[in-house]
Amino acid sequence: MTRLHRYQLLALIGLFGPFAAGRASAAAPPRMAVIVGASAPQLALDRDTLRNIYLEKIFVDKEGRRLIPVNLPPETPLREAFTQMLIRMPGNRLQDYWDRQYFQGVSPPYVLGSQQAVVRFVASTPGAIGYVSTCFLTPEVHVALWLPLPAGSGASTDACPESPEH
């Protein structure tokens, strides 16, 4: 391979490599992926529907299948960004909401310890829905909705380790 061909190949890898790996390009605004299992029926999600799923106001999809939203731990920047953008309730008001729901027999979404755990759970659990940084996407999950990360959320800077373990 000539030196020129090597440079062209490196340029192509640099240009398309981030997309092949499921990462956003440097020019694209940072975003998170709302995911469902790859074998799950395609959900038509918008922000309002997703908000209602996460507030447990919608329990089943149009075909009657149970929806199971999952969260990251409360202290993670990605969950804080997700909650800020989608739920639009301060932490104390959201806690009050869940306290009231609990006495009506409605529990908050499950909490999983990491983005890798979210991907594994969503991939293997029918009806599960979660959110992760783009670097954690695998062929076992399907992106149902892209959500931009709020500026200054901290979620975009620490969401993707150098080499995530799937």
Image (cartoon, rainbow, N blue to C red):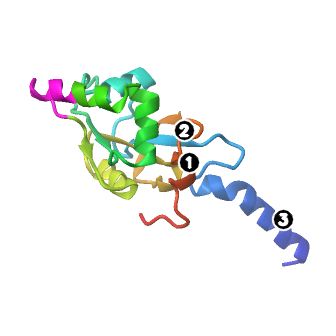
User: Mark 2–mark 1 contact, CB under 8 Å?
Assistant: yes
Q: Which residue is mark 3?
A: 8
On screen, residue 88 versus residue 128, left or right, reads right
Disc 1 marks a residue whose amino acid type is Ser
Q: Which residue is mark 2?
A: 149
Task: Read off the magenta span.
Answer: 98-107
The answer to which image quadrant residue 92 occupies is top left
Q: Secondary structure at mark 1?
A: helix
The answer to which image quadrant residue 39 occupies is top left
Mark 2 or mark 3, whichever is nearer to me: 2
Quarter of the image that includes the C terminus: bottom left
Q: Residue at x 47, y 52 (%)?
A: 137
Q: Residue at x 37, y 28 (%)?
A: 90
Question: 147 or 19, which lies in front?
Answer: 147
**138 relative to 55, above or below:** below
| Mark sitting on residue 156 | 1
Q: CA distance from mark 2 to mark 1?
A: 7 Å
User: Where is residue 27 drawn, in percent x and y?
Assistant: 72, 44
Q: Secondary structure at mark 3?
A: helix
